[in-house]
Amino acid sequence: MTLSELKAFMVERKRASVAEISLHFDSPASAILPMLEQWMAKGRLCKLDMQGGCGKVGSGCSCKEAPVDIYEWRPSPQG
């Protein structure tokens, strides 16, 4: 996977989790995260704050789902 391939995927999908990207490219998250960080540094990708499970904070949550990192592609300022 290249930065350009990741960009094309994100442009098409708009939003995706690390798990979805990993599955699509058949690559481990450890290989994907540095590429996501590069696009974030360029201002083209942002990480959304998402809650896992029921969304209750602290001991009020009995869900087993962990928070999920969702990344969203930002269109270029030029259009």
Image: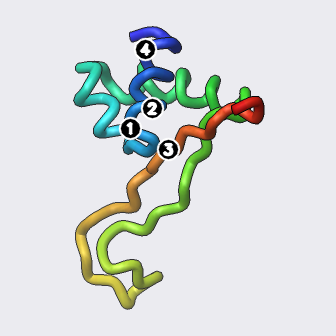
Q: Earlier in the sequence, mark 2 or mark 4?
A: 4
Q: Residues within 10 Å of mark 1 (few under 14, many from 20)?
A: few
Q: Earlier in the sequence, mark 3 or mark 2?
A: 2
Q: Quadrant of residue 41?
A: top right
**Residue 13 marker:** 1
Q: Look at the numbered disc 4 and give the secondary structure of its residue.
A: helix
Residue 63 in the image, given as x and y percentages of width and height: 25, 76
Name the residue beneath numbered marker 4. 5
- Labelled pair 2, 1 in contact (Cβ < 8 Å): yes
- Labelled pair 3, 2 in contact (Cβ < 8 Å): yes
Alpha carbon separation for disc pair 2 and 1: 5 Å
- Labelled pair 3, 1 in contact (Cβ < 8 Å): no
Alpha carbon separation for disc pair 3 and 1: 10 Å
Name the residue beneath numbered marker 2. 10
Give the residue displayed 34% in from the left and 84% down from the top. Answer: 61
Q: Amino acid at mark 4?
A: Glu
> Which is more foreground, mark 3 or mark 2?
2
Q: Residues within 10 Å of mark 3 (few under 14, many from 20)?
A: many
> Which is more foreground, mark 3 or mark 1?
1
Q: Nearer the viewer, residue 10 or 70?
A: 10
Name the residue furthest bottom: 60
Q: Earlier in the sequence, mark 4 or mark 3?
A: 4
Q: Look at the numbered disc 3 and give the secondary structure of its residue.
A: strand
Residue 18 in the image, given as x and y percentages of width and height: 38, 38
Name the residue beneath numbered marker 3. 71
Q: Amino acid at mark 2?
A: Met
Q: Amino acid at mark 1?
A: Arg
Q: Amino acid at mark 3?
A: Tyr
- Which quadrant does the N terminus fall into? top left
